[in-house]
Image: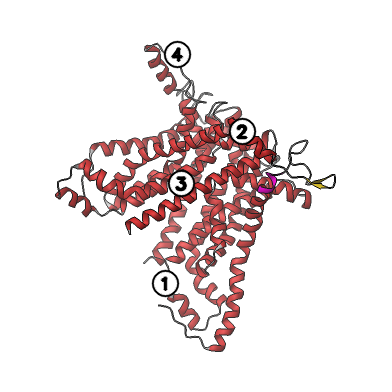
Amino acid sequence: MKWSSAGGTTRACSSMTSRLGRWAVSLPPTLFLLVFFVAPSLIMIVASFRFPGEYGGLAPLVEHGRWQYTLETYRFFFSDFIYAEIFIKSFAVALATTLICILMAYPLAWLIARSPKRHQDLMVLLAVLPFASNFLIRVYAWMIILGPQAALARATNSVLAVFGFEPVTLLFSPFAVLVGMVYVHLPFMILPLYTNLARHDPALLDAAQDLGANAWQRFWRVTWPLSLPGIFSGSVLVFIPVLGMFAIPDILGGTGDILIGNLIKEQFLGTRDWPFGATLSLMLTLAVLALAGLAAWFARRGVGRHA
Amino acid sequence: MRKNSWWLWTAALAAYAFLYLPLLIVVLYSFNDSRLNAEWVGFTLHWYRELIHDTDMLVAARNSLLIAASASLIATVLGTLAGLAIHRYKLRILPVLAVTPVAMPEILLSVSLLLFFNLVFRPWLGLELGMWSVIVAHVTFCIGFVAIVVRVSLLGMDESVFEAARDLGATPWQTFRLVTFPLILPAVMAGALMAFALSLDDFVITFFTAGVGVSTLPLEIYSMIKIAVTPEVNAISTLLMLLTLGMIVLASRIHGKAFGSSGP
């Protein structure tokens, strides 16, 4: 309950100090983020309309007494199908990663949610603990496991040899990229799924059983539809970071396994074509914003239906 | 409680194995007496000895700690203010500003900061990329995390405590210093620890904003993985995992206190 006992004069005085307090509290973080988050984002938008410099970077903004702006990078992006193809491929990898994460996380999250309450915290901690190790270490682990001299590759190839197939390399392949993506992002799916499943009312399943539903029907008609919001938030948390990932294809992928992230990195650190890099980054930003908007729309619809 | 079926256990155990086996292999091979991470040869501490004498790695470790300490300190101050501001006042812009850098793919923040530092700071202020640019970049994405932790702890608090302080004649500053701050301190500490861990761990944003001269542990690990893999990487990985584990234990102690004192 809200009430105030302050009198007229003290209220006027305290409203002034509280306005001062408001500025003192909100101004420093707002200013910092305006300078180091908003300004850089705006600069990136502007950079995408500029000419590349002769030795990399950007050409001067004003040259021969004229402002130098162009739509060249956007024309370039749409002139060659290879760039659209890399975007499509990145979406496909993100989608595949998300689906595999759902398949792997669901049984684990469900088991934890159905375990005795006193075990649940520990089981969740065990599921997310590997996530606390450095990102590169987790990717590096798969370099060892999938390496050409490691047991897995040798076993695979000896099996393939029995059936008369050519030996394959596991590392530096799209397969390795997918494994790495799933491994790194799995906890993002486990946590929201568990949070959702743990809230389900067990009475619903009892009721379904009393009404004659078998185990599969109880899952498909009760648990699964109720868990969709959890799957949904997990999918957003997996899909978006995978879409922009450059390090995993860089380390586990072959020369051909390039995603949007690698393309952007190449423009800034390799060929130094900053305007094109900025254009690609903007395209990725737009894709992420569209996905976020779509997610918000779905979430609102879902809430409306279950309310 | 329903009995879990055998297949659910099997699938869940497989998921746990999938999560842990790769890391176990990294740790195991850090003690392996072979240059190749392919099969077990014999026990050795050789790779740890190599690590101690690797000056590049030691410099990188010192840089990492320096960056993490400064970035988490600044991010904790700004993030705590942001958390307080978002909770107290109906702000519309600040929540978006604090959370968006966390929600976007890391590479977007990285390249926009790279552009910003190169186009504004270098020509106008004569500053080359270095340790400072990494610290600034880390603060930018850590503010959101600290703000969220502080905000969540404020949400769990009884507003009447602050009203009581005001009614007893405390100025806003006194209310903050004597009531609010002691109450949110555990959350602030947890947020600081989180920011420290995130900064220590970060690869992508550091990769773009570090410039030429500065190296951190993740950057060092990356170049070792890309150029020449030796079990020295396993050794540094094992040590880093131990460090993170220690920090998690510490954080959970603080976290436990945070929720023990202000829980519902």
- For disc 3, the marked residue is A237
| Residue where numbered disc 4 is placed | A166
- Badge 1 element: loop
Disc 4 to disc 3, C-alpha distance = 38 Å
Q: Mark 2 falls on what kind of element?
A: helix
Of the residues tagged 2 and 4, which is closer to the observer?
Answer: 4
Q: Tell which circle, 4 or 3, labels the residue nearer the N-terminal end.
A: 4
Q: Are marks 1 and 4 in contact (CB under 8 Å)?
A: no
> Which image quadrant for residue A127?
top left
Which residue is the site of mark 2? B223
Image depth: mark 2 or mark 1 in front = 1
Measured in 3D between alpha carbons, the distance from the residue under mark 2 to the one under mark 4, in whole angstroms, is 32 Å
Q: Does B264 sit left or right of A265 as displayed? A: left
Tags 2 and 1 on a common chain:
yes
**What type is the residue that disc 2 sits on?**
Ser
The answer to whether mark 3 and mark 2 are in CB contact below 8 A is no
| Vertical relation: A296 (above or below) A248 | below
Name the residue located 56 percent from the left edge and 86 percent from the top edge: A10
Please tell me which of labels 2 and 1 falls first in the chain.
1
What is the secondary structure assignment of the residue under circle 4? loop
Rendered image: mark on residue B113: none
Identify residue for label 1: B158
Marks 3, 2: nearer the viewer: 3
Q: Position of residue B211 (x, y in %)?
A: 69, 42
